[in-house]
Image (cartoon, rainbow, N blue to C red):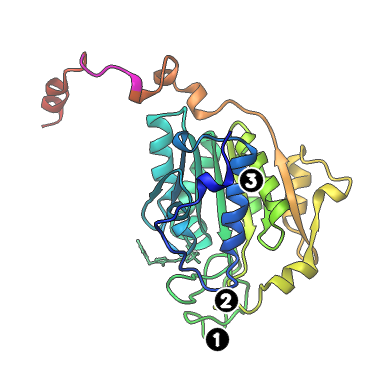
Amino acid sequence: MVELSQLHEPTHTITWCPGCGNFSILAALKKAIVDCNLEPHNTVIVSGIGCGGKIPHFIKTYGFESLHGRALAAASGIKLANHKLEVIVVGGDGDGYGIGANHFIHASRRNYDMTYIVQNNQIYGLTTGQASPTSEKSMKTKSTPFGVIEQPINPIALALAAGATFIARGFSGDLTHLSNLISQGIKHKGFAFIDVFQPCVIWNHINTFEYFRKKCYKLEQTDYKPNDKFEAFRKAFETDKLPIGVFYQEQRPTYEDELPQLSTSPLVKQPIDNIDIQKTLEKYL
Ligand SMILES: Cc1ncc(C[n+]2csc(CCOP(=O)(O)OP(=O)(O)O)c2C)c(N)n1
């Protein structure tokens, strides 16, 4: 049984700005790891680059901070090398919906058994305030001094269209609710995607804690059932009020289930002494 204190990483100081929405995402993730009783030595947290990408440094599991936009690509490699590992991926909206959007689509349709948490602060935080793919139209940022002219990405609708099998949205101002969503995502067999409203207190003065407190409501407190893709699309496009909770869940075989090479044991456990690497090299040289 893992204890919260075991996940504390004493060697790294947290450098997020005071009041950053990432603090409660970190706390919610730790709580979910404890609630799901994950073993730290069998858990890997993978991130891209960004403020939120620092998370693997602050939790005592295995961790890998990869490249900007490549969190899911690195995580897929880790999962396929050892599919017995619990893989949790975290990254910003710039990371996952901008430069890494392609990986988001393909990880969703492949249905790897992993959990993907997007710290969606609707801005590029680390690089000090440029517009991201989820910045609202007209928002003035360093890179859009006259206001954003593009339509923002709708992450929930994108995940639905791409084929993710668990799709949820949380708010970092509601730690218990968010942690519960992360736990559900971890327990789900397949690609679990959780978009998180994560106010950036320095660079985004529109989508604040106050803003989300006024606008969010919980799907589970209505008669909504997350088993109908078309209803989920309808919910994904609500903007007057913003639903949080589980939008959609289905069971479908995972990529690992269908890959014959993994049917006996994880790749890392398979013998390599019967492979003649010289022959393979000669084929390509
Ligand atoms: C290939 C590449 N392009 C650009 C950058 C510069 N860069 C670092 S973080 C970042 C955006 C961060 O925004 P986001 O992913 O939303 O994360 P946040 O910092 O807001 O948590 C950019 C553009 C980079 N490190 N690598």
Q: Mark 1 vs ligand 1: CB under 8 Å?
A: no
Secondary structure found at label 2? loop
Q: Amino acid at mark 2?
A: Ile
Mark nearest the camera among 3 and 1 is 3
The C terminus lies in quadrant: top left
Q: What residue is shown with label 2?
A: 149
Q: Residue at x 80, y 70 (%)?
A: 214
Alpha carbon distance from label 2 to label 3 = 33 Å
Residue 78 visible to the viewer: yes
Q: Nearer the viewer, residue 116 or 153?
A: 116
Q: Which element type, helix, strand or loop, lies under badge 3? A: helix
Q: Which residue is mark 3?
A: 182
User: What residue does disc 1 label?
Assistant: 146
Q: Are marks 3 and 1 in contact (CB under 8 Å)?
A: no
**Magenta stretch contains residue 190:** no
Position in image of residue 181 (x %, y %): 68, 46
Name the spot of residue 207 as percent of width and height, x first. Answer: 66, 72
Q: Is residue 272 magenta?
A: yes
The span picked out in magenta is 269-273
Report the amino acid beneath label 1.
Phe
Which quadrant of the frame does ligand 1 lie within?
A: bottom left
- Give the vertical position of 242 relative to 40 (above or below): below
Residue 253 at x, y percent in the picture: 58, 25
